[in-house]
Image: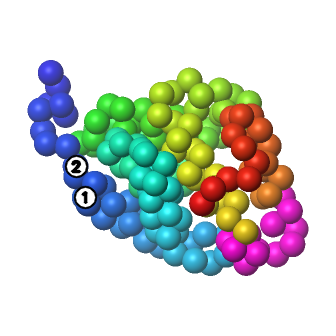
Amino acid sequence: MTDNERRPLLTLTEVEALARNAHAAQTDKAGRPYAEHLRAVAEGVRARGGDEDQIAAAWLHDSVEDDALSEDWLREAALSTRTKDLVLAVTKRPGESPQAYAARILATPGALLLKESDLAHNANPERLAALDPATRTRLTEKYRKMRELLDLPQNPRP
């Protein structure tokens, strides 16, 4: 057993606070605080029947990709191995094809639920309406293609 496995794991409340702090200076494409997206994804995971590992991963799902937290930090964090695996599964890598990204999500148990919640919030018509038409069109198509690669319905529930 490693030192990391011996120390108590962060609670969901601690993970939420950590994620909010890590993304505190960040806004989404519409200029809203990024923590709103994290909360929506975590709540979406919870509403879809996700477990604590998935909810924790939802709070952290963009942390490595957005350089809010490092992959080294994630490796050493007091989180379950499953939570770490889920975060890494949904972390896009530079130059990675959408097909390779989708394959990793599908190969990681529990990651599809997390990505489904992320896509549902990203594609929320109210969120998209706040964007300029070109960005809205580009992102709508990007999310449609990813849903197709993941074999998810095109009309997501919130």
Q: Which residue lies under the disc numbered 1?
A: 14
Residue 28 image point, x, y percent = 61, 69
Amino acid type, callout 2: Leu
- Residue at horizontal 45%, vertical 59%? 43
Q: Residues within 10 Å of mark 1 (few under 14, many from 20)?
A: few
The magenta segment? 126-138
Give, as a three-letter code, the residue at label 1: Glu
Q: For the C terminus, which image quadrant?
A: bottom right
Residue 37 tag number:
none
Give x and y (percent) for residue 75. 34, 36
Q: Is 7 on the left-hand or right-hand side of 63?
A: left
Disc assigned to residue 10 = 2
Instruction: Judge whether 89 appears above or below 55 on screen.
Output: above
Q: Secondary structure at mark 1?
A: helix
> What residue lies at 42% left-to-right and 32% top-to-bottom?
85
Element under label 2? Answer: loop
Residue under the image location 51 percent in, 27 percent down: 108
- The answer to whether the residue labelled 2 contacts the one labelled 1, judged by CB atoms less than 8 Å apart, is yes
Is 53 rendered above or below residue 6? below
Determine the main secondary structure of the stretch shown in magenta: helix
